[in-house]
Amino acid sequence: MGDVVDLVSNALRKKLLDHGARSLTEVEWHLLRISHLLNSIEDTTFDRLLADSPLAELLALADGLDAIQAPDAARSIRGAATALAVANDPGRGLERSEVVASIAKRLGDRMVGMRSTVEERLLNYAFRQRELEPGDPVAS
């Protein structure tokens, strides 16, 4: 299934680059964020994704996971975002990198176990979306 997720991800990235952020629907944003998550787990860049993503983006990712009916993964991402928010508090700059690494390790281990379920639910979600049907002006 990884190849299908890559195809979806690449198509949405191309649309984003060609037409801008406003061209993507909420469904497409969910697909793009979650496919990016899945790719980061597969290519072991999850820790970077977690460290470099703004908290709002992580919360949007969690919303996407809820939308595809992956509530355990969504709760895990929200928990990590909460822990990262604490790590971003003033005066914690010196320990931030260690805290982020610890959060990324725990969450990464958890997400590796959920990866196939999330991928399956992502594809099921995509196939249920009427706006992604061929011939729909939004899908092009």
Image (tube, rainbow, N blue to C red):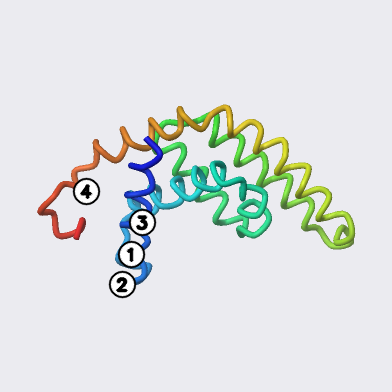
> Tag 3 or tag 4, which sits nearer the N-term?
3
- The residue lying toward the viewer, choosing from 126 and 90, is 126
Residue in the image at 38% along x and 52% along y: 9
- The residue that disc 2 covers is 18
Mark 1, secondary structure of its residue: helix
The disc at residue 14 is 1
The earlier-in-sequence mark between 1 and 4 is 1
For label 3, the residue is 10
Frontmost of labels 1 and 4 is: 1
Q: Earlier in the sequence, mark 2 or mark 4?
A: 2
Could you tell me how far apart the alpha carbons at marks 4 and 3 are, in whole angstroms?
15 Å
Q: Is residue 127 left or right of residue 8?
A: left
Label 4 Cα neighbours within 10 Å, binned few <14 / some 14-19 / many ≥20: some
The quadrant of the picture occupied by the N terminus is top left
Q: Amino acid at mark 1?
A: Lys
> Few, some or many C-alpha atoms within 10 Å of disc 3 (few <14, some 14-19, many ≥20)?
some
- Relative to 62, is 90 above or below? below
- In percent of width and height, residue 43 lies at 56, 46
Q: CA distance from mark 1 to mark 4?
A: 15 Å
Cβ atoms under marks 1 and 4 closer than 8 Å:
no
Label 1 – label 3 distance at C-alpha? 6 Å
The crowd level at tag 2 (other Cα within 10 Å; few <14, some 14-19, many 20+) is few
Which residue in the protein does label 4 denote?
132
**Secondary element type, mark 3:** helix
Compared across the picture, whether 104 is left or right of 135 comes to: right
Q: Check whether the beta carbons of the residues at disc 2 and disc 1 lie within 8 A of each other.
A: yes
Q: Amino acid at mark 4?
A: Leu
Q: Residue at x 67, y 42 (%)?
A: 80
Relative to residue 23, is residue 58 depicted above or below?
above
